[in-house]
Image: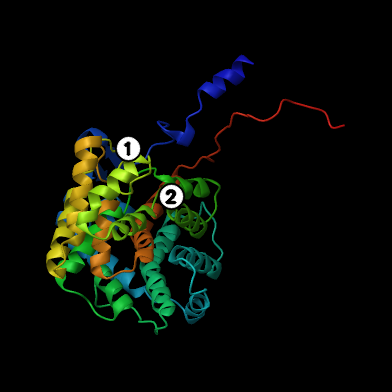
Amino acid sequence: MAAAKKAANDIRKGLVGVVADTTAISKVVPEKRMLTYRGYAVHELAEKCSFEEVAYLLLMGELPTKSQLASFRKKERAAREITRPHVEVIKRFPKNAHPMDTIRTAVSYLGTTEVAWGGEPAKKDLERAINLFAKIPTMIATDFRFRQGKSRIKPKADLSFSENFFHMCFGKVPPKEVVRAFDISLTCYAEHSFNASTFADRVIASTRSDIYSAVTGAIGALKGPLHGGANEAVMEMLADIGKPAKAEKWLRKRLANKQLVMGFGHRVYRWGDSRVPIMRQCLEDLSAWAGDDTWIEISDILENIMVGEKGIHPNLDFPSGPAYYLMGFPINLYTPIFVASRITGWAAHYLEQNANNMLIRPLSAYSGPAERKVR
């Protein structure tokens, strides 16, 4: 009885405060409102490096030299295209399916094209990781085009990762300030320690399952509005408000009813997030480019009240939602874009888990009926 009570008292719902393992990939520093990748502050990486450089850093452990980056880019660009049968599978997806469901299934299909298991040589899984990194944007864009009733646009090897995504979605590459904002968003979303989807990825990896299964599971976790789907929910919230003149009344009613305000608060960051200012600057640049300050004005009203009166700071999803909207992406494509970024972090964690594996299998405290007999 005493042991049972002790177990019940030790329960951490949501694993709050539980340190499950070590990682060399990223670190959250709440007191500095900062996130680092391999020791580098993310806001500095976003400012000074391309997303391809950041992807290399996460996967390989160090920022690339010029020759290493050239080789990495060449390998990624050569792997972008997907097979005709893969295209046909995506074409058959229901057009009303959520894009997170279609990218989850498209990644799972890729896993059927070879027999893979966890615990194989790291070099082989690194190749698979780069293959996923290259192909996921193609899968997303292919589905995006088909659900619009349009023909797919093949990837181009002479474009950067971000430029190519715009090309495959819209058939053209926007001005450099738009591409740069998108690139920065990918860097900001690439990795975030043991978040829900990454932990799901590592749990699956710990069973010695393959990288495709781990990434498919991670996508399922990311879909939820309390995790990756929050950027979609932010833009839906802003669109629901519609006009700056309605923002304060909308928010105060929401608060009075004790309803969640999307884009604010974070399990780890209590005093703000250093990724937010650089993404906010991107939003301002995009607003100037589009000639539309609507979302900036609504955001400012919400933020002033939430921070000033509630002490709750915006998270990364708050500026990224309207930023993606101004780039021209439909709201239901925001979380799949997150996938195209976070595949780098998931793959890095998959490789790290496999390198020093132990099955992740927590205990539970039973709360059902007492032991009884069948009569």
Between 373 and 190, the one lying in front of the other is 373
Q: Residue furthest bottom?
A: 151
Observer-side mark, 2 or 1, equals 1
Residue type at mark 2?
A: Ser
Looking at the rendering, in which quadrant would you find the C terminus? Answer: top right
Between 95 and 68, the one lying in front of the other is 95
Q: Residue at x 41, y 63 (%)?
A: 127
Q: Position of residue 101 (x, y in %)?
A: 49, 64
The residue labelled by disc 1 is 268
- Provide the secondary structure element on which disc 2 rests: helix
Residue type at mark 1?
A: Val
Left or right: where 119 falls relative to 138: right
The residue labelled by disc 2 is 197
On screen, 375 above or below 318?
above
Left or right: where 253 falls relative to 88: left
Q: Position of residue 268 (x, y in %)?
A: 32, 37
Q: Crowdedness of circle 1 by 10 Å Cα count: few (<14), some, many (20+)?
A: some
Between 101 and 237, the one lying in front of the other is 237
Q: Residue at x 50, y 45 (%)?
A: 203
On screen, 146 above or below 112?
below
Q: Quadrant of residue 371?
A: top right
Q: Residue at x 33, y 50 (%)?
A: 191
Q: Is residue 316 visible?
A: no
Q: Position of residue 320 (x, y in %)?
A: 26, 57
* Number of marks in the rendered image: 2
Q: Is residue 140 visible?
A: yes
Looking at the rendering, in which quadrant would you find the N terminus? Answer: top right
Q: Residue furthest right?
A: 375
Q: CA distance from mark 2 to mark 1?
A: 15 Å
Q: Position of residue 135 (x, y in %)?
A: 39, 69
